[in-house]
Image: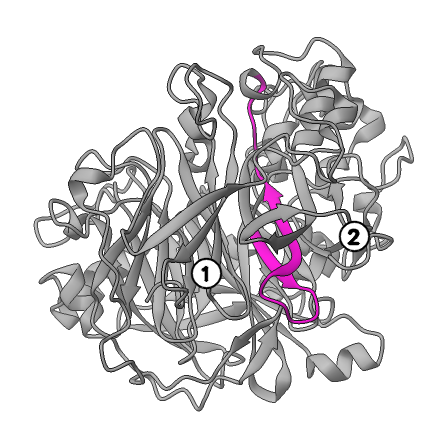
């Protein structure tokens, strides 16, 4: 989205482009992104732990292990076929539409009408389908709970008008955001929602709890004394080894504005707060989001976190895990590292912002047995990339004298994580988005683009970085160390004009066999709609599995335990403009376009991506 592309980092930290120039010359790899991908580097990780998370077995697959006929065998969507008015999929696959925006959360609930009322929207699937995860019921690949993020929906799309005119309008918009937990089941070959006590909406007005270093701190209190409520701009996501869902708050600043006189402080400037926000107008009718209202000072500190949700238990409050830092969380990839400690990799989706890592203090099973969340006690780090292909994880703790001189407490530091990362000298990146951990221990991160890079030269096509790239690294000490080695997996603009063309990589997921699923969000070359591709991380081969509709982002990746079904999302079809598309309506005539989940299966019932 355009607001992700603003530059809010005014620090003098060395740009990643400077580092990349030196590193690429040293490695002499500017011979093509695909050749670079095929030359995949290995650092001798001493085995990624075999764990089961959210019903998906993350097997310890050897890097070189592959099927006799290769990892990717489907017929790709051709370049010429990927720009139509309806989604396209490989001829070896089929797709169905599931839970579009406004679908009743429970069978018999309020059906879609436009615009919805606030009460209706609170009981319907939200808009802006994004990150999600499938939680199987009793290990089933045909029955489970789908936890799904609802990132954004502008007023014209949701309300049918550019600005709210009442608190009721604001509530409708608020209830369209957040998270849905919905029970789904495959019945007679078709996935559908089923009645469930676990199905629920979590939105801006849902009570939440705080944990970790910021919990109970005065910086979370307001003069009005209102209880903490809500989650918003829920972008990508993650899941834990103990079966919970992690939803990530990204562009939270855009929902705040100011009705009266207001001057932003350093913290608010660093996070991009403004008097108008993104034009939602919530602050005109809901004082919680009015930055000029002294009674709700600090309300903005309650957003920008990773939020843990127990999908199976609707009685539990969502918990904001503040040890993971406050920034524009794109998503989190959680893995189990040395000694059973959990490690989470995160990107801050803004031009020239940072990549982060969290490492729990102890074995996650031991911590939970003692009643301690592994996401509450640990160390948050920011990444610094060095010229020689090495890197350092810089701890963001009050023990650092430079940070202690700036912050009064670890809580204050966590609230202003971006400023702390500025101080320690983390490397500004090109909009870090999704992260994923491959079974051989490599970590991949998509960097969507950065057209404001100014150090271009003939040898380096990445400045300006209009099309993005994917970086990968391998940490020391099975993810828990403070050093890493890094390389570039692929530079997106080197694929243009070929059948493997893509730009603006965003969503990414590494499967247990070594495939990398890549989703895009941004202008594509060669007339393509946004798309999902599958890359073989051993050979660099890329094939296009799916393309969406005009104006839509492709996002969200989750699979059933047997990997025979994949769920992805089409977000903001036509950018909400009914004149551009009526997706997913199949009938003639124009209806309101609706974000929707897409169910992908191979026609032969095989593993998705093969």
Quarter occupied by the C terminus: bottom left
Q: Percent position (x, y) of residue 125? A: 65, 36
Q: Percent position (x, y) of residue 92? A: 29, 56
Q: Which residue is mark 1?
A: 435
Vertical position of residue 35 compared to residue 368: above or below = above
In this view, the residue in front, 433 or 99, is 99
Q: Is residue 448 left or right of residue 293?
A: left
In this view, the residue in front, 184 or 253, is 184
Quarter occupied by the N terminus: top left
**SS under mark 2:** loop
How many other residues sit within 10 Å of disc 1, few (<14), some (14-19) or many (≥20)?
Answer: many
Which dot, 2 or 1, sits closer to the camera?
Answer: 2
Q: Which residue is mark 2?
A: 198
**SS under mark 1:** strand
Q: Is residue 405 visible?
A: no
> For residue 508, which quarter of the picture?
bottom left
Kindly give the residue lying farthest to the right in the view shown.
225
Membership of 151 in magenta stretch: yes
In this view, the residue in front, 92 or 485, is 92
Q: How is the image coloured?
A: one colour
Q: Percent position (x, y) of residue 394? A: 51, 68
Q: Is residue 151 visible?
A: yes
Choose the circle earlier in sequence order: 2 or 1.
2
Kindly give the residue lying farthest to the bottom in the view shown.
46
Membership of 467 in magenta stretch: no
First to last magenta residue range: 132-155
Write the residue at 32% across / 28% down.
85
Vertical position of residue 362 compared to residue 287: above or below = below
């Amino acid at each position: 989205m355009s607001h992700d592309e603003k530059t809010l980092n005014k620090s003098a930290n060395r740009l990643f482009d400077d580092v990349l120039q030196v590193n690429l010359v040293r490695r002499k790899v500017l011979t093509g992104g695909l050749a670079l991908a095929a030359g995949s580097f290995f650092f001798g990780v001493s085995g990624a732990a075999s764990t089961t998370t959210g019903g998906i077995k993350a097997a310890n697959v050897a890097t070189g292990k592959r099927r006799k006929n290769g990892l990717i065998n489907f017929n790709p969507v051709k370049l010429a076929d990927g720009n139509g008015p309806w989604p396209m999929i490989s001829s070896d696959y089929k797709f169905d539409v599931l839970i579009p925006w406004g679908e009743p959360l429970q069978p018999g609930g309020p059906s879609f009408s436009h615009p919805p009322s606030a009460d209706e929207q609170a009981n319907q699937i939200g808009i802006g389908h994004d990150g999600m995860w499938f939680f199987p019921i009793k290990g089933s690949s045909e029955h489970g709970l789908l936890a799904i993020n609802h990132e954004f929906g502008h007023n014209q799309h949701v309300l049918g008008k550019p600005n709210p005119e009442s608190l009721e309008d604001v509530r409708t918009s608020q209830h369209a955001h957040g998270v849905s937990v919905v029970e789904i089941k495959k019945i007679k070959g078709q996935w559908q929602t089923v009645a469930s006590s676990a199905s629920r909406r979590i939105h801006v007005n849902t009570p939440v709890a705080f944990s970790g270093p910021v919990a109970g701190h005065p910086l979370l209190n307001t003069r009005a004394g209102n209880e903490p409520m809500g989650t918003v701009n829920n972008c990508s996501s993650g899941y834990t080894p103990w079966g919970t869902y992690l939803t990530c708050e990204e562009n939270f600043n855009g929902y705040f504005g100011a009705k009266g006189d207001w001057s932003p402080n350093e913290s608010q400037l660093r996070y991009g707060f403004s008097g108008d926000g993104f034009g939602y107008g919530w602050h005109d009718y809901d004082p919680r989001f009015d930055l000029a209202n002294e009674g709700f000072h600090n309300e903005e500190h309650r957003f920008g976190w990773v939020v843990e949700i127990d999908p199976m238990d609707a009685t539990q409050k969502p918990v904001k895990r503040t040890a993971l830092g406050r920034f524009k969380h794109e998503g989190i990839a959680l893995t189990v590292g040395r000694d059973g400690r959990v490690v989470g990799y995160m990107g801050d989706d803004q031009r020239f912002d940072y990549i982060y890592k969290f490492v729990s203090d102890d074995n996650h099973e031991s911590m939970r047995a003692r009643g301690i969340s592994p996401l509450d006690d640990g160390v948050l780090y920011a990444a610094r990339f060095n010229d020689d292909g090495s890197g350092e994880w810089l701890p963001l703790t009050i023990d650092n004298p430079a940070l202690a001189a700036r912050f009064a407490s670890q809580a204050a530091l966590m609230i202003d994580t971006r400023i702390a990362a500025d101080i320690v000298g983390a490397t500004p990146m090109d909009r870090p988005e999704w992260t994923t951990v491959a079974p051989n221990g490599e970590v991949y991160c998509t960097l969507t683009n950065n057209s404001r890079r100014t150090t271009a030269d003939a040898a380096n096509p990445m400045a300006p970085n209009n099309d993005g790239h994917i970086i990968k690294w391998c940490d020391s000490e099975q993810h828990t160390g403070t050093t890493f080695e890094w390389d570039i997996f692929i530079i997106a603009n080197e694929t243009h004009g070929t059948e493997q063309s893509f730009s603006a990589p965003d969503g990414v997921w590494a499967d247990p066999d070594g495939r990398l699923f890549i989703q895009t969000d941004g202008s594509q070359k060669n007339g393509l709609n946004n798309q999902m591709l599958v890359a073989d991380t051993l050979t660099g081969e890329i094939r296009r599995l799916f393309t969406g509709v005009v104006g839509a982002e492709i996002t969200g990746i989750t699979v059933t335990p047997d990997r025979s079904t994949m769920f992805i999302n089409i977000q903001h079809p036509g950018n909400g403009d009914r004149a551009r598309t009526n997706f997913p309506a199949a009938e003639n005539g124009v209806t309101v376009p609706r974000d929707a989940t897409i169910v992908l299966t191979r026609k032969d019932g095989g593993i998705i991506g093969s």
